[in-house]
Amino acid sequence: MRRLTLGLCAGVAVAAALAGSTAAIRAAEPPAPTFTGDVAPILQEKCQDCHRKGQMAPMSLVTYEETRPYARGIKQKVVTRMMPPWHIDDTVGIRKFKNDMSLSPKQIETIAKWVDAGAPQGNPADMPPAKNWPKDDVWRLADVYRRAPDLIVKSTPWTQSAQGQDQWWQPVVDTGLTEDRWVQGIEIRPSLTGRPIVHHVVSYLVQKEDNYGAVDVPGGGGYFSEFAVGKIGDMFRENTGKLMKAGSKIRFDIHYHSVGREVTDSSEIAIWFYPKGVTPKYRVFPQAMGVQDSMRTLDIPPGVVTTHHAYITLPQPARLENYQPHMHVRGKAMSMEAIYPDGRSEMLSYVNRFDFNWHVNYVYADDVAPVLPKGTVIKLTAWHDNTAANRANPDPTQWVGWGQRSYDDMYHAHVNVTYLTQEDYDKIIAERKKARADSVVSRLQ
């Protein structure tokens, strides 16, 4: 009996020690994230631009009560990087963008841990103040330029049914310009009533052109600007701009989706001009890079993943301002490389998870936007998935070629190109080399 008692006492002591050790470990663990203290600031920064009442997202994620029912779905979307829609591979090429809406690894981890902990609300006092969103009926760039827009072009109305397939509305509207004008800034917005049904608004400038790189699709115009998640338009760098000619037209390409009630929209483009008589040094050329190659060569047999290439030679030194790949429902991925005149090749950008539902425009930061010498060849590589593994594929048994319908396909990249003088090209390259050298010295100190 004595040995048994001693054994029991020893067991109790060991158990107590283990319990104490476990309690100490738990005490050392950081507390689980809460909605008010940790998750709400992330949603304000990266999600609520769309996920709030009156906007295009199907649910609002402003309050805890609104967000809690979707906690598991939110985790799945952010862990798989499906949301926010930012589909570029951040391990290769240029990694710094003006409009980066992606979540950092730490933000993704915070949301995942919050959901795994049961999605606790936390202390209401920790809730950050509600974000003061710009009013939907004002032009945001009016504050930047300190004046109302000089020209507003409005699309002809479209009524989206309460239920039904997504629609792409493509009206062509006269600008009313009677003289050539240089554009400083562009802002696009759907109507107030149309916000919930508008996925994106792409606009094209239709006018007679003689310059290289101005128009890629005869009669279709050159890319002008866009409204999409995280983007309302364009502001051009100092001493650069787009040229709108007398008699020009705007071709709208508006993606609508049904929201359970009939809604009518008429989207608007606001344009700010340089003063009359002022001509910026550089014209920004909107290019649909690769569209001609695509129209000639796209051929997608049933049941396969295909690879196609396009090559575009830069006739002058140039700076690429952005990268926006475009394909249809079978689009899988697209890369953009620079092949230099000396034969070197450099990956600029690679969208490895293309999603036709999101036309994301990746706007390069000023200090990393590609500045390329005359004779550089831009190489686009497009992958299309015409197999049953592609969930967006309507019919993997069909042979697919180039076409405007969503169930046809295509590939090109919308890129704003600013052609430079050799002198300015040399100056920018020298400044960037010096900045890199100074950065290395700073890190070593």
Image (cartoon, rainbow, N blue to C red):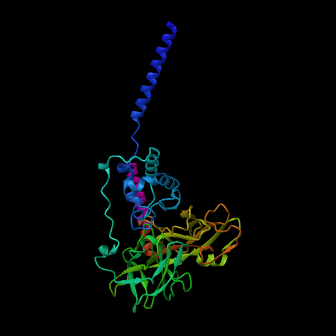
Instruction: Give the quadrant of residue 392.
Output: bottom right
| Residue 339 coordinates in the image, percent (x, y) | 58, 68
Please give left or right for residue 228 compared with residue 291 in the image.
left
Residue 420, visible in the rendered structure: no
Instruction: Give the quadrant of residue 431.
Output: bottom left
| Residue 216 coordinates in the image, percent (x, y) | 55, 81
The residue range painted magenta reads 429-445
- Frontmost residue, 237 versus 421: 237
Give the answer, above or below, for where 352 lies relative to 9: below
Residue 431 part of the magenta segment: yes
Residue at the top extreme? 2
Residue 27, visible in the rendered structure: yes
- Frontmost residue, 179 versus 385: 385
Please give the name of the residue rendered at 46% of the width and 59% of the height, measured from the top-left corner. Answer: 102
| Residue 297 coordinates in the image, percent (x, y) | 67, 75
- Frontmost residue, 348 versus 438: 348
Residue 46 part of the magenta segment: no
Instruction: Give the quadrant of residue 104.
Output: bottom left
Please give left or right for residue 36 compared with residue 204 in the image.
left
Give the answer, above or below, for where 113 lies relative to 25: below
